[in-house]
Image: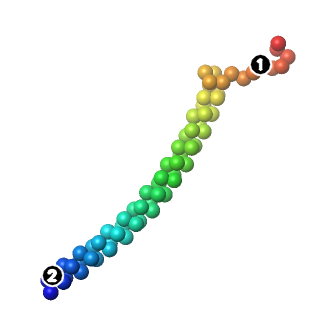
Amino acid sequence: MRLVDRIVKAIQFSVRVNDKLGSLSEKVERLSGEVRHLDRRLVRVETAMELASNRAFRPLPPAGDG
């Protein structure tokens, strides 16, 4: 009977590990989406900062100055 008990415990353990891996996989997928979203936001902020600085963008002078 000891061998059967060990086999049953091993199967139960592998089922629990499988459940935890499935949950972990879902969380990693969700975090990946959040990182992509934050990356896009960061790019927009960087672009706005570059456009606002004099190094990257100079507005055209008014039409009457010229």
In the rendered image, the residue lying farthest to the left is 2
For the point 29% across and 72% down, the residue is 14
Q: CA distance from mark 1 to mark 2?
A: 87 Å
For the point 23% across and 78% down, the residue is 9
Q: Is residue 19 left or right of residue 56?
A: left
Q: Is residue 30 above or below residue 41?
A: below
Task: Determine which quarter of the picture holds residue 44.
Answer: top right
Horizontal and vertical percent position of residue 18: 35, 69
Horizontal and vertical percent position of residue 11: 27, 76
**Of the residues shown, which amino acid type is indicated by label 1?**
Pro
All told, the count of numbered labels is 2
Q: Is residue 58 above or below residue 32?
A: above
Q: Which mark is residue 61?
A: 1
2, 61: nearer the viewer: 2
Task: Determine which quarter of the picture holds residue 15.
Answer: bottom left
Instruction: Please rate how many residues cluster around mark 1, counting C-alpha atoms within 10 Å: few if below 14, some from 14 to 19, many from 20.
Output: few
Residue that label 2 marks: 3
Instruction: Please rate how many residues cluster around mark 2, counting C-alpha atoms within 10 Å: few if below 14, some from 14 to 19, many from 20.
Output: few
Q: What element does badge 1 sit on?
A: loop
Horizontal and vertical percent position of residue 25: 42, 61
In the rendered image, the residue lying farthest to the right is 64
Task: Determine which quarter of the picture holds residue 45.
Answer: top right
Which quadrant is the N terminus positioned in? bottom left
Q: Are marks 1 and 2 in contact (CB under 8 Å)?
A: no
Horizontal and vertical percent position of residue 43: 57, 38
